[in-house]
Every structure is written in structure tokens, then in C-alpha cells.
Amino acid sequence: MKRLLVIAAILCSSLMVLQGCSPKGATAGANLKRGNVSGTWVLNDVTFDGVPAMNVKSLFNEASYKCFIGSTWKLTNSGNGTYLLPGTADCPTKTQSIFWSVSTADQTFQFKKLYEGDKAKNVTEGYRLILSEATGDRLVLKSPVDYGKNPAYIILNFTKAMK
């Protein structure tokens, strides 16, 4: 009987150790990783949560959010990238170099604008967006904005560009 209790105690201890070693929150952020963000994306739609569209004057201190609709974002696995604003009657065509990264710990996508001669390590200002969804063909980024007392977001909805 004593042997049976010792074996049961060893089994229970082993199970507790194995449970303690399992990754925490592995399923919550499983799709939110760098590899799912790399590629070429087209910004199809910009929506708003908690802020009226008419109160949003510009996106990324660049141009109206409307100028970004249809933009192409090329994000290489090395962290280098660009976005191309397609240009319309009200919006100039523009290509902007960026350096980007993903933080799976806090589920964010961040990028810095790079101008000619800039090195990413020397650029101290950038943008941090919530990485809401990153699957094979869909990317959703939420840009927090200050508006009133409640959280507000500009939501960028991307689809993977066809090769």
C-alpha cells in the first residue's frame, strides 16, 4: 500500500511539473506572429471605432486616411518595407520606406518611417498599432487615437496581394 501511495505521489508531481511547463496563452496569439505579417498587403478599408471619421485629419502624419485606401504595403521578413499611396485627384502618389517589427508579447505592429540616409536604429519616432488579426490572407491593425475619455481606434483592414 505504501508503494502505491509513493507511485501516485510521483505521478501527481510529474503532471504538475508538465502542466507548469506548458506555454501560457499559446492559442491566443498563435496567429499573431511576424511570419503572418510578412508579404505584400493592400489596404482595402479604413473604419473607425469610438471616433467619427470627420475628426480624423491625417493618418501617420502623412495624409488623409482616404489617401491610404488602396495603398500597397510591402513588408519583407528582414523588417524593411514600403508603403505606396496610389494617388488620386486629392492625394499625391507617394512611396515611403519603413522599418517594421511585430511584438507577440503585447500583440503590436510597429514601424518607423525612413527617409533617404536614415538608419532605423537612429530613428526614435514611430507608430505602434494593435495587431488585431494576422492570418494567411487578412491583416487587421488598430491605431489608437485620443478622442474623449473612451478608447478610440482607426482600424486598417488589409488583404494579401495576389502574386
Image: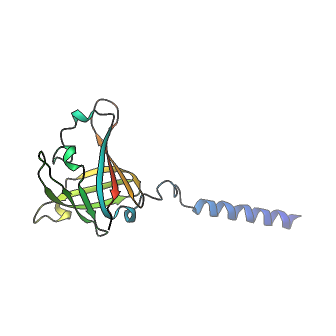
| Residue 149 location (% of width, % of height) | 32, 30
Picture mark count: 0
Q: Which of these two is toward me, 163 or 152?
A: 163
Q: Residue furthest right?
A: 1
The residue sitting at 60% across, 59% down in the picture is 20
Q: Is residue 106 visible?
A: no
The answer to whether residue 143 is above or below residue 39 is: above
Which quarter of the rendering shows the N terminus? bottom right
The answer to whether residue 43 is above or below residue 46 is: below
Q: Is residue 27 left or right of residue 10?
A: left
| Residue 43 location (% of width, % of height) | 28, 53
Which quarter of the rendering shows the C terminus? bottom left
Q: Residue furthest bottom?
A: 78
| Residue 33 location (% of width, % of height) | 41, 61
Q: Which of these two is toward me, 159 or 7?
A: 159
Q: Which of these two is toward me, 122 or 10?
A: 122
The residue sitting at 22% across, 37% down in the picture is 56
Q: Is residue 16 left or right of residue 54?
A: right
Q: Residue furthest top?
A: 148
The residue sitting at 18% across, 38% down in the picture is 57
| Quarter of the rendering containing residue 59 | top left
Q: Is residue 83 left or right of residue 153?
A: left
Display coloring: rainbow
| Residue 109 location (% of width, % of height) | 32, 55
| Quarter of the rendering containing residue 11 | bottom right
The answer to whether residue 48 is above or below residue 24 is: above
| Quarter of the rendering containing residue 96 | bottom left
Q: Is residue 127 visible?
A: yes
